[in-house]
Amino acid sequence: MSDATTPLVAIIMGSKNDWDTMKRAAGVLDDFGVPNEARVLSAHRTPGELTAYLNEKEAQGVEVFIGGAGGAAHLPGVIAAQTVRPVLGVPIESQSLKGLDSLLSIVQMPSGIPVGTLAIGAAGASNAALMAVAILANSRPDLREKIVAYRKERADKILSESLE
Amino acid sequence: MSDATTPLVAIIMGSKNDWDTMKRAAGVLDDFGVPNEARVLSAHRTPGELTAYLNEKEAQGVEVFIGGAGGAAHLPGVIAAQTVRPVLGVPIESQSLKGLDSLLSIVQMPSGIPVGTLAIGAAGASNAALMAVAILANSRPDLREKIVAYRKERADKILSESLE
Amino acid sequence: MSDATTPLVAIIMGSKNDWDTMKRAAGVLDDFGVPNEARVLSAHRTPGELTAYLNEKEAQGVEVFIGGAGGAAHLPGVIAAQTVRPVLGVPIESQSLKGLDSLLSIVQMPSGIPVGTLAIGAAGASNAALMAVAILANSRPDLREKIVAYRKERADKILSESLE
Amino acid sequence: MSDATTPLVAIIMGSKNDWDTMKRAAGVLDDFGVPNEARVLSAHRTPGELTAYLNEKEAQGVEVFIGGAGGAAHLPGVIAAQTVRPVLGVPIESQSLKGLDSLLSIVQMPSGIPVGTLAIGAAGASNAALMAVAILANSRPDLREKIVAYRKERADKILSESLE
Amino acid sequence: MSDATTPLVAIIMGSKNDWDTMKRAAGVLDDFGVPNEARVLSAHRTPGELTAYLNEKEAQGVEVFIGGAGGAAHLPGVIAAQTVRPVLGVPIESQSLKGLDSLLSIVQMPSGIPVGTLAIGAAGASNAALMAVAILANSRPDLREKIVAYRKERADKILSESLE
Amino acid sequence: MSDATTPLVAIIMGSKNDWDTMKRAAGVLDDFGVPNEARVLSAHRTPGELTAYLNEKEAQGVEVFIGGAGGAAHLPGVIAAQTVRPVLGVPIESQSLKGLDSLLSIVQMPSGIPVGTLAIGAAGASNAALMAVAILANSRPDLREKIVAYRKERADKILSESLE
Amino acid sequence: MSDATTPLVAIIMGSKNDWDTMKRAAGVLDDFGVPNEARVLSAHRTPGELTAYLNEKEAQGVEVFIGGAGGAAHLPGVIAAQTVRPVLGVPIESQSLKGLDSLLSIVQMPSGIPVGTLAIGAAGASNAALMAVAILANSRPDLREKIVAYRKERADKILSESLE
Amino acid sequence: MSDATTPLVAIIMGSKNDWDTMKRAAGVLDDFGVPNEARVLSAHRTPGELTAYLNEKEAQGVEVFIGGAGGAAHLPGVIAAQTVRPVLGVPIESQSLKGLDSLLSIVQMPSGIPVGTLAIGAAGASNAALMAVAILANSRPDLREKIVAYRKERADKILSESLE
């Protein structure tokens, strides 16, 4: 979790157990130098505090919210219902159904309240951060260049790998 | 929709389209003489009004809430997060995934906030009403006798049916 | 398993192996001071004893039955067919299909015989107990206050957690 | 439905609506000259009558029971729990989940109580009858020859078909 | 694997790896004193030898064939295409799809060639043997009494179990 | 399809048949006054033209790309591989698997190349447009106010609906 | 169905009903001028005739076999077990499970006997033919040029389409 | 990975992690003496290098391309879009959805661009190689004899196995 004072991205998860997945989002944002903060707040168990937090962060200037949740993963949708900022959702792999439940609960939002959904688990968490960076980069050209560099670095790594 | 002044059961659905399914719940409650009312309120599109409605109905003495929703069906869980009364969930059949998404979004609730989930679609809606009647009947023996009679009538109907 | 003499909730499971999951239901009921008992009885292997047990417990004043079962999980439905008290179902995670079979076998009950279904596995077991408490609380206001306190305690725990 | 006085095969279904599928089983049995009868009896709505019927038919000499059911399709398993005669199960196509729920509810029986499960829908119904004939044919060589003839006839039909 | 000279039941599996599951079928048959034999023969890799084996065993008087297979589990269906004796199928749990592929490949047989399908994995293997015993018992009343005794023993075991 | 000369959002679909779904995205963007254009370009059948189009549009200042595709829906991922602008994906309902294939093919992107995925079908298409508006609104406060107004209008519509 | 005397591709389907899908394969082969023939032969109902046909066609010089089947779709695998020529499989959309059963039954072949599987339904049938053409084209450069031209024509058609 | 100078088969995978599965394809090709090479190239992360590699290999005379990928497995389809040589796809088992996502993303290709898809995981990788050998063998009779010998060897191994 980044310790930035004025975050641009807020990462929210329904349970402390989700941090093992969601810390990858924070890590990617840190790598890009994007101020962010992470918080455990549950759509079901702390709905009032979630609302208060969303209002506070929107007022502070958060531009993207990332919600990670598993099972009947309502958190990203409940965030999206309370902010007009872009909301990204990360389905956490669940115990029995392996995140298929999380995925459907996040992505199948009704018309009117969108959640941009990423892949189940760790890949989804880091991609949520990259998507947030791409959104922020629309008005921050330096960030866009960092994405280009990041992609080139990843591509070079793949190209340099040997199968032996 | 019943027109009772002091409802014991409140039926909430996320979209007017869900009424085609949920009216079966109202119909069963009416058949049992249980005061009930139905309302369209969305967890995502009218979250504030939903909260206000839940508070008002809980204060009025509603003993069971029934939520029907499709797709990323957050409504029953969001109701359950805001009341300590029993909450029943009805997964509405969705366009593409036929209610499997609705079912998983309703039933896979995290530990702490239960939703008693019924079958997808019309059978689930009428069963939600029967479950509500059974819950109410715990302190209303006359209702329990009505359930016994209802079941006997249904059994007799099955037994009297001919396959020719 | 609680050792109460006049149980309000009876927990039934199809196999001793299911106790590892279902003991969470008993634990929650114990925490709330709700008299309960647990028993292994199979819808398929001991149908006669199951019927006898249900009749005995209904006569004793059990107000909620909880059935836990895996695979072709018929137990909750078979219980519901033989009592007019509210029946809750807990899908136990199965070996191959991870509880998807258990869930569908419990939740997709036909119109007329409802089973209020909870999540697959441990979360479902503890939530079945919480749902039972909420049902009992309809005529026991002190229990309702315990639910409020329980939820506040859980919320406080989430809010006090640090991600570091 | 065949009108035989001493049936060798009993076809049971949970709802009159299932007859549209299950009549194919009766038709195949009729074609093979196997005495059979069909009855609507529900594992959930008429459990007592179901038990009485099974006892009566087993005493009369029924050698194979066929159960057809949809959704949380408990009927074949509940039959199998109450007879030691072979039980075959036909998953009826359900409204929302298209019989996947019916199939899993029938086939995933726990160790100890087998149900020989056929395909979802009409093909399963006619195959349940053919399977019953094959079981009966173990001690009735003339039936076995009828199966051979039946298969030859079907094969000839396929081979004579033209794609134009 | 039983060492009977004139088997009544033949157990066939597509790979030696399947024996870990299918030996439960052989064990149950041995417990019931039913002569049986097990063989590894693949519908895809040894189709000719499979045909020869089926012909030989049918001539020897095998009354039930049990096929166990995983993945695109064609073995039970290919057996059923070549014998008019009853054929039972056991879906073996597969590596990736956990036997859902095996189940569908076995149970969804077209009209005309039935396979009585049991549960995925070990429960299915022992139930296939119990189903075979029930089929044999139609003309062997002593076996039927053994099933009654077996079920009573299993029920007594469940009833004697303590949850402490 | 909007006729804007300098589009901010480009909508791409793999087949003309997808327009029936994707035109809802264009309609929402038109309603918000967001310049957009739609084009049929296939990741598989016209890969070169797709690349050329993406390069041209990125140079023109398109800030969000929306890709709609069905089946093995590679289009959104292939777009995302070739631009650093935010890419949204809409799974089109497919003939046999009803869009589950489309959804998984779009959302399960590997780490490094994110696609923000919306719901299957029409709801997903209109939500992709709303998500695009939210992204654009991060640097266009007037658009943010339009979202607030749009949501209020939708909420008022729900609240004014009668179930009679 | 083409009327070629020495076919290079043989299309086999398990039921005449499958022709509605599989005729698309024949049509594409005809368009490419590839001699082909189609036949209804069932892995289950006419296994002997299937073997005879495969031997005859392999001797005649057929270079690719295409098998189309639905449900427990064993046909392509059974073909592959009896020829060393490349075998392609087309999952036919089934009544209840919409071809998911067909797909898994065809694609999940065990190590040793491959079936190159195409998409469910009509797209799979025409792609099986295109795949067969690509295989044949490895030693027939003129066919390869036809594929290039075919693709160009299809691309041009997409590029010329207007959304108005 | 084979070290052949003029490969007939090129194996491409999206991530070095996939080599654990795909090396089985290389191993089978080596066993058959088929020159092959393997390379890590991503449809998403190195699209340009992938195109260059495909062009180079097609010019060198590669006759079959094998693509292995997991999750939103676009690689085989993206290869197929850029070559007219036969393309085979191997779904790699993914973390959460166990390769069901990989399978659907590979096999459900739209009409026009076929990918011959094999089973999920290791069996699919070795079968992709066998399928490639069968394709090459169409114009290389010695390879066809090797397949015959390989199959005989595998069959003999099965027939010689003992279950004790």
Image (tube, coloured by chain):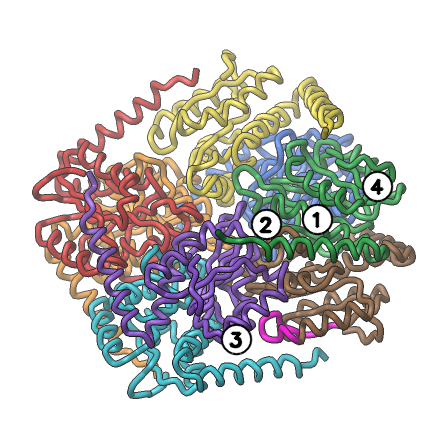
Chain colours: A cyan, B red, C orange, D yellow, E blue, F purple, G green, H brown
* Badge 4 element: loop
As drawn, is E67 to the left or to the right of D26? right
Q: Which residue is mark 3?
A: F112
Q: Which residue is mark 1?
A: G128
Viewer-closest of C14 and D72: D72
| For discs 2 and 1, the disc positioned in front in the rendered view | 1
Residue E25 seen: no
Which amino acid type is marked by label 2? Asp
Q: Which residue is mark 4?
A: G7
Viewer-closest of C44 and E6: C44
Magenta stretch bounds: H38-48
Question: What residue is drawn where x is 49% and y is 27%?
Answer: D21
Image location of residue F133, percent across then percent down = 35, 67
The mark that comes first in sequence, 4 or 1, is: 4
Image location of residue C33, percent across then percent down = 19, 59
Q: CA distance from mark 1 to mark 3?
A: 33 Å
Residue F59 seen: yes
* Badge 2 element: helix
Residue A139 in the image: above or below residue E129 = below
Subunit of label 1: G
Q: Are marks 4 and 3 on the same chain?
A: no
* Badge 1 element: helix
Question: What residue is drawn where x is 67% and y is 37%?
Answer: E65
Q: Which residue is mark 2?
A: E101
Badges 4 and 3: C-beta atoms under 8 Å apart? no
**Residue H40 part of the magenta-drawn span:** yes
Which amino acid type is marked by label 3? Gly
Residue A23 figure quarter? bottom left
Q: Residues within 10 Å of mark 4 (few under 14, many from 20)?
A: many
Which amino acid type is marked by label 1? Ala
Q: CA distance from mark 4 to mark 1?
A: 16 Å
Subunit of label 4: G
